[in-house]
Amino acid sequence: MVGTNFVHCTVLLNEAVDALAIQPDGIYVDCTFGRGGHSRLILSKLGPNGRLIAFDKDLYAIAEAATITDPRFTIVHEGFVTLAESLGQLGIEKIDGLLMDLGVSSPQLDDGARGFSFRFDAPLDMRMDTTRGQTAAEWLNLAEEKDIAEVVKDYGEERFARQVAAAIVTRRASKPFATTGELSEVVATAVRTREPGQNPATRTFQAIRIYINRELEELSLALPQALRLLKTGGRLSVIAFHSLEDRIVKRFIQDAAKGDHLPSRLPIRASEIAAAPLQVIGKPIRASEIEIKANPRARSAILRVAARTAGPL
């Protein structure tokens, strides 16, 4: 199977798994199996009655997961937006911990055939799950110019978003987009200044990938599900790689850790105020210089950890 031979260095491997404070007989969820780095380490810490359920959209990840024959392990070919529903189908109502490793994985970027990267001239696909949904090429060839501009601006934080969208629409009028190379060339004509060390297509490719895979939308829908599923004392461990997804995680944890928002002069005792449903655990964790040197993609990673309290939702 193409794509299974790429080397993948799991970012913040020990830190993210240690943050779960694993109980040997607990039930844990790895929301993004990838190539199984986090899942295998979690399994190594579980006892005979422990259980791990992993999710992934990517068929290559599912193929890799099939090599794990441990009866304590279950793989689900779905995105983590189906978290509550999929676990319910497995008879699981509560879990002891949940780990999210967000964004695109190294094997997805390094396999040119997947269409995620401008470093290769390949079919413009960008779908994490190639069994369903619209490809990046299909969307770019049909979308309104204003919608393309909005996606590139909001998800790529590209200040030349309007120019990029206009260039895309002009180009597709004569020849529809089919490859990553075609898109990269067009974007390069529209982005007038380059950030040091960054390809001018970087932000546009990120934006289209996030949109095609509904990454931020699914994250926003999955976090509340995770909170409802966690047992008291259960841990949430989330690794983000760019500011948009980290902002969602940070705000969700902060809001859930604040508890009731009551007027300052309301005559009520502190003991009568319901506890917040989440407690922030430690400060955000970043990759060490040693890890960054071994794996430069770890440079932008940030790990946030929280624990479920007895507070109501």
Image (tube, rainbow, N blue to C red):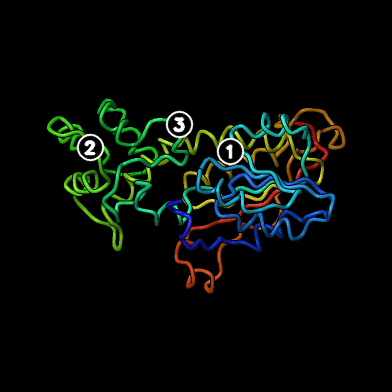
Q: Can residue 127 be seen in this view?
A: yes
Indicate the position of residue 118 as horizontal and vertical percent values: 30, 52
39 to the left or right of 34: right
Taking depth in this image into account, of 309 and 261 the one nearest to the observer is 309
Three-letter residue code for mark 2: Phe
Indicate the position of residue 199 as horizontal and vertical percent values: 28, 56
Res. 77 mark:
1
Indicate the position of residue 246 as horizontal and vertical percent values: 53, 47
Mark 2 and mark 3: Cα distance apart in space: 20 Å
Residue occupied by mark 3:
132
Q: Residue at x 34, y 36 (%)?
A: 136
Residue 229 placement: quadrant: top right
Task: Say which label, 3 or 1, has the lower sequence index.
Answer: 1
Residue occupied by mark 2:
177
Eyeballing the image, is 40 above or below 211?
below
Indicate the position of residue 4 as horizontal and vertical percent values: 48, 55
Toward the front, the furthest residue is 1
Q: Residue at x 34, y 53 (%)?
A: 112
> Dividing the image into 4 quarters, which one contains the C terminus?
top right
Toward the left, the furthest residue is 174
- The secondary structure type at the circle numbered 3 is loop
Three-letter residue code for mark 3: Arg
Taking depth in this image into account, of 199 and 273 the one nearest to the observer is 199
Density class for disc 3 (Cα within 10 Å; few <14, some 14-19, many ≥20) is: few
Residue 140 placement: quadrant: top left
Task: Say which label, 1 or 2, has the lower sequence index.
Answer: 1
Q: Can residue 97 be seen in this view?
A: no
Eyeballing the image, is 102 above or below 18?
above
Q: Residue at x 68, y 60 (%)?
A: 41
- The secondary structure type at the circle numbered 1 is loop
